[in-house]
Structures are given as C-alpha cells and as structure tokens.
Image (cartoon, rainbow, N blue to C red):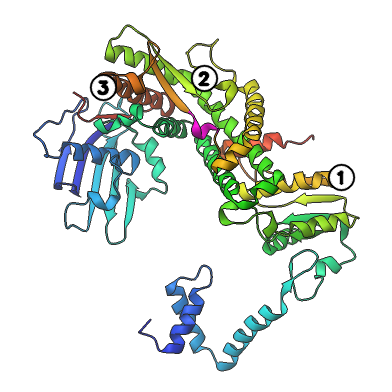
Amino acid sequence: MTYYVGPVANLIRELHKLPGIGPKSAQRLAFFILQLPVAEAQRLAEAILVAREKISYCSICGNLTDQDPCSICRDEARNPALICVVEQARDVIAIEKTRNYRGRYHVLQGALSPMDGIGPEKLRITELIDRIQNGGVQEVILGTNLNPEGDVTAMYLAKLLKPSGVRVTRLAHGLPVGGDLEYADELTLSKSLEGRREM
Amino acid sequence: MLLKNLELYHFRNYSEQEITCSPSINIFWGTNAQGKSNLLEAIYYLGYGRSYRQVPDDQVIQWDYPGWRINAQIVNNLMDPIYQSCDSLDIVYSRETKKKTIRLNQHNLSKISNLGTIFPVVLFSPDDLPLVKGSPGERRYFLDSLLNRIYPSYYKVNQRYQRNLTQRNHHLRSSKAGNNKYLLETYDQELSELGARILQFRFEFLPMLSKYVKNFYREIAGEKAELSLLYLSSLPSTAQIEFNYGPDKTVKAVDYYSSLVSNFYTTLGRLRNTDRQRGFTSIGPHRDDLVFRLANKNLRQFGSQGQQRSLVLALRLSELVILENYIARRPVLILDDVF
C-alpha cells in the first residue's frame, strides 16, 4: 500500500473489506470513485450512510426495513395465518419475486451450525414461537436452505413447533423445473420419490 | 487401459524422459535410487491426480526447477487392432502459481476425480501394509474410495453424513448441549438416516468384495484355510456381519433400511450421555471396521508379514477387478517392489 497516498490507500482498504472484492477490484473501484465528480461521490457516500442508519430489522419478522414494523408485516392484504420461515432477508426477496406467496415471513438471520458457534439461541427462534403463541397462525412453511445446516434447522423447528398444533410444512426437495431425470443424482431423485404427489 | 507412451519433465529425478511401454506387462528393474518408484509415482499421478506417497505437488519437482509436467498417450480400447486412437493426458504443475492443470486432449479437466474413469490405476506398494495392519480408518478409506468410484451418490451421502457428524460433535462439546434435547434429537435423526444409507451401500457391495478377496488370497497364499471377511459394525444388532457371496446370503437392502435407521437412532439416543462426556459420536459408519480372519485369527494382529502382504495384494487385485466390472475398463495395475 505504500504506492498510494494515504487517503487512496484507505479507500482501497475499506473497499477490500467488502465481500467478493479482491485487491485488484478494490483498486479499480477506488480509481473509479476518484474520477467521479464530487457531487456523485457525495451521493454514493450518503447512500451508504443513509441506508446504514435508516435500515434496521423489523421487530416482528426480522426482515430489513426502514419502518418498524416492515411493509410486509403491515400489509393487511397478506394472510397473517401463514408464515414462511427463511434464513436471510435475501431469501424473502427471492420468494417475493415469485409473486405467488401472499403470507408473511419470519427471518431467522442464520441457520443452526454448532461448528460456527450458532446455536438456537443465536437465531430468532424465540420470536417465532412468541408469534405463534400469540395466536392466529395456522401454518408455518419451513423455507430454510436445502443444505445440511438448513435441513437440520428445519427439522429442529418442526420438532419445536409440533406441540403448538400449527401445521408445519417444508419446501419441496427434488427435481428442478425443466430438469432431466438422467442428470439428477441419486440423492435428489430419492428425495423427489419420497416427496411424490398424487395426480 | 493401456499406457502407450510416457514423458516426464522435471519430475523427481527425471529432467526429461520418454518411455514407450509394451502393450502387455512392463517390468522396470535397476539398482537402488535410479527412479523406479518415481516412474510409478508419475503413472499413479495420471490416475489420481496426486502422489501416493502423500506429498504435496511441489515436492515432486526436480530440484531448483519451476515446475513439472507429465504427458501420457493412453489407449482406451484395447480391442482396437491398429492401436492408434490414443488420448493425450497432461498434468502440469507450476511452483509459481501453485496450480496443477490436467488436460485431456488439450481440454482442461474440471474435476480431478474424473481421472478415475479416464485412466483408472490400481497400485500395490510396500507402503500399503497399513491397509491391513493399520487403524480401522485405513480400511474405511479403502472401502469408501472404492464405493465413491462405483456409486457416485455414495460420495454425496457420505459427505453429508460427515458434515452432520462434525456439527453434532461440535454441539456435544458446546456447553449448551445439556439443555437442548431437540437439537441433539435432530442431529440423531439426520445421522441415522444418512448412516443407514451408507451401511446399505456397504452391505450391498461387501459380498462381492469378499468373493474376490477370498479367491485372490487363496491363489496368492496357497493356504488351505479359508479367509473370511467380517464387517465390524458399531451398531449393536449388526455387530458382526460375515459376508459370503451368494443369492441367499446377500442382505436384502430394501427392507433392511428402515430397521437400520431405527437401530441407529435408538442407539444414538442411548449413548447420548457417553457421547456428551467424550465429546464425540461413538457409533456409526465412521467407527466401523473390516476384519479379515484366517482360521479364526484376525490377520491384523496375528497374521505373519507374508500373510499380511498377500492380503493387501488380494485387496488390490479385487479393487482392480471390481473397478473393471463397474467402469468397463481394465485399470492399469502398478506393482511396486512386489517380489
């Protein structure tokens, strides 16, 4: 970093901390920013600051929001009896893009992973149980990822929620839409056999 | 599978060497430290993408050179009378980039494990004795790597099992393990389902392995007593299973699965306190072993040096035949210092 004068070096170092940004990309971004008109750079800096200050987690569902409760939790048209549990705020966006889901969400902010020190107490599980105990919930859809951690989180929640009597469902595993049977691996195929449906 | 031609550049003690092989058996002889094993190591590299001596890629570079390269002309179809249709297999390693590139006919290979079907190799070397004498892990490794190559989904199931096992062990060691019954139950459930699948694969496969090992051992050692292969399971009700080949004796895997799952699950539950104290999962396919017995004596402990070597060779030859059956190509057999 001795090639750069102090402020440039600082900028590169900060950009380098972002995910997916290596030293080369950080340098390219820094030089791009330095060429911007001052007003433009100001807007970028402000956008970062404002987003960071205004955005917080929704106290009900844990999604990112600028108002508490978030727009989805406030939306009267959405079915409050249906909750989809996901790991991250970006999963909410993925499901919203389908425009097929009219229930509400619950963002856990992670998945169970003892090797990373993430136990049930680190996730927003108590909040989920409170929501269900407050009544009105009929079905919980477990939409955690389909990797080992996501699966374990889903199974754990299913065990935990069973006594409450609500219906607990899991997103289907199996073959992708447009997929060919011959290319599916045995694990995927056997999962989709287990989850087959009457036609 | 045939190795027609081999070129080595700055690999071990070879600066530049070209070798043309004969289409049947090839014998390399010479005095000590001439590089016979190094040559075999290079052939092994073609089949596995790594050294069998468990050294990193940068340690096989000839002293002071920036990298090494192995090029081989391999022939797939031995029936081909003109013996012309060769594939060119290249492995290049550069010390500077620390990168190993594998190319088949100039196309980069995405996965090293693909080499297993492109140029299958089976090796027998003096360093192989731990397969019989060593810890159970050595024999599980042998079994797992063979199963991985035969059933592609075995690898996935095993990988998932190992992942859940690591998570369960971390959970057992964390201070909160005591007050969360549900989480441990969840791991138990996942482990028992995946573990039962692993056992199912192993049980389906073992009768065949048993058949070949017995026959090869008889041929090599010429002993009257029959060798028996036992699977030593850490699950109580399947504690010892002897595998004999035959339609009546093969375990019917399908109806077996659910009983394996419940057996595994209840045992995990019973050992929960022990596991918590020890900080690891004490039963499961990751703790199992293969036992070879001759006249009721475990060859691992009581076999003579000669018997143990014969058994290793029998295992390697079985590996060869089984791979040949499954991937429809006869692997290249490398025998290092077999006499």
Question: Circle 1 is placed at which residue position?
Answer: A165
Residue extent of the magenta highlight: B283-288
Task: Find residue B262 and report its horizontal and vertical position in percent.
Answer: 67, 28
Residue B305: assigned label = 3
Point out the image quarter for the N terminus of chain B: top left
Type of amino acid under label 2: Gln
Q: Is residue A160 left or right of residue B336?
A: right
C-alpha separation, residue under disc 3 versus residue under disc 2: 26 Å
Q: Is residue B311 left or right of residue A29?
A: left
Residue B240: assigned label = 2
Q: Can residue A73 be seen?
A: yes
C-alpha separation, residue under disc 1 versus residue under disc 3: 65 Å
Query: Crowding near pointer 2: few (<14 within 10 Å), some, many (20+)?
Result: some
Q: Give the number of the mark in front: 1 or 2.
A: 2
Type of amino acid under label 3: Gln
Point out the image quarter for the C terminus of chain B: top left
